[in-house]
């Protein structure tokens, strides 16, 4: 098996190469490249391999730029220094992900997984992986500026209990129960607040997971929440959102 390593840290590349030889003596590391530019040049000259090990962050940019600029049908195993939470966000979208520092057993499993990989999945895999990376690396709003009388105050996003649409405006409700109008629609808020913390349970409410006290079944296949400063229909998780809501709670 011919392998290409794309990694800008020399010691990490050498460590991976040594582990690969221990996993399978028939694995041959053709070359190690340390940048997007060098990788594009090498692929442009016809360099081919059976499997690529690719670090996400390279000296001159993200390795996704390689795949966006050149059609590459070689299966990829990405390596990353992200934490376990981030790693889980990627697992379904590639041959595999390896968390640095890479261990031999994890590497062995990744190589075995590669041997069962269907190349037909490659294009969709790369699209999903870039999307997943952009999702977890995105910077969300840390605070909202709101009006309080003649003054403007800052409310930390973590102190927001929920956002609710009422009478044509959206209100920010704090954990202390204070309500402030904000100049955003719920659709505009969606990409601005961290998705691991906030979920839109229905057409009116974005809720902070930390304010949910209880979740119960409700008629017509819906769910009803117990949460501070919410009542009536505002507490209902709409039927079309129930499945995604359960997955969100279980992350």
Image (tube, rainbow, N blue to C red):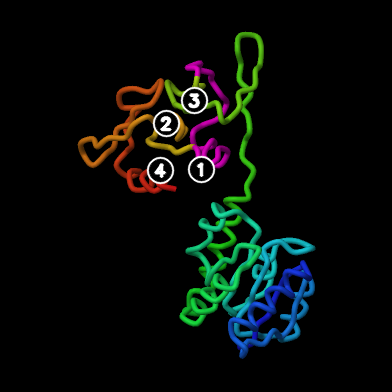
Mark 2 or mark 4: name the one nearer the start of the chain.
Answer: 2
Residue 200 in which image quadrant? top left
When the figure is inspected, residue 237 is found, relative to residue 115, above or below; the finding is above
Q: Is residue 186 magenta?
A: yes
Determine contact: label 4, label 3, CB under 8 Å. no
Question: Which disc, if any, is residue 208?
Answer: none
Tag 2's secondary structure? Answer: strand
Marks 3 and 1: which is nearer the front? 1
Image quarter of the N terminus: bottom right
Between marks 2 and 1 in the image, the one whose residue lies nearer the viewer: 1
**Residue highlighted by disc 4:** 249
Q: Residue at x 74, y 75 (%)?
A: 14
Q: Residue 147, image x and y in percent?
A: 61, 16
Taking the spot 49% from the left edge, 25% from the top edge, the residue there is: 170
Check disc 1 and report the residue beneath it: 195
Cα separation, mark 3 vs mark 1, equals 19 Å
In this view, the mark in front (2 or 4): 4
Secondary structure character of the magenta stretch overall: loop
The answer to whether residue 128 is left or right of residue 154 is left
Query: Pointer 2 and pointer 4: residues touching (CB < 8 Å)?
Result: no
Q: Is residue 36 visible?
A: no
Picture quadrant of residue 104 = bottom right
Q: Which percent across, then down, holds residue 160?
A: 52, 27
CA–CA distance in space, label 4 to label 3: 24 Å
Q: Does the residue at mark 4 contact the one at mark 1 (Cβ under 8 Å)?
A: no
Q: Are marks 2 and 1 in contact (CB under 8 Å)?
A: no
- The label shown at residue 205 is 2
Q: Give the extent of the magenta segment.
A: 176-197
């Amino acid at each position: 098996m011919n392998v290409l390593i794309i990694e800008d840290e020399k010691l990490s590349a050498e460590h991976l190469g040594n582990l690969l030889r221990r996993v399978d003596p028939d694995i041959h590391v053709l070359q190690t490249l340390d940048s997007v530019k060098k990788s594009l040049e090498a692929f442009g000259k016809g360099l081919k391999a059976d499997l690529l090990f690719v670090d996400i962050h390279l000296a001159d940019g993200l390795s996704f730029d390689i795949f966006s600029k050149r059609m590459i049908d070689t299966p990829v195993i990405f390596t990353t220094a992200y934490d376990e939470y981030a790693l889980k966000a990627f697992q379904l979208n590639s041959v595999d992900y390896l968390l640095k520092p890479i261990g031999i057993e994890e590497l062995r499993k990744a190589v075995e997984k590669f041997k069962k990989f269907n190349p037909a999945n490659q294009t969709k895999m790369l699209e999903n992986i870039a999307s997943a990376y952009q999702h977890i690396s995105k910077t969300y709003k840390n605070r909202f500026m709101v009006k309080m009388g003649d003054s403007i105050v800052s409310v930390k996003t973590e102190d927001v209990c929920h956002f609710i649409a009422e009478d044509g405006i959206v209100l920010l409700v704090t954990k202390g129960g204070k309500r402030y109008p904000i100049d955003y629609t719920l659709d505009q808020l969606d990409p601005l607040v961290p998705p691991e913390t906030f979920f839109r349970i229905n057409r009116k409410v974005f809720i902070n997971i930390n304010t949910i006290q209880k979740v119960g079944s409700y008629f017509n296949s819906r769910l009803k929440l117990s949460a501070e400063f919410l009542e009536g229909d505002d507490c209902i998780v709409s039927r079309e959102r129930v499945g995604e809501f359960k997955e969100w709670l279980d992350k």
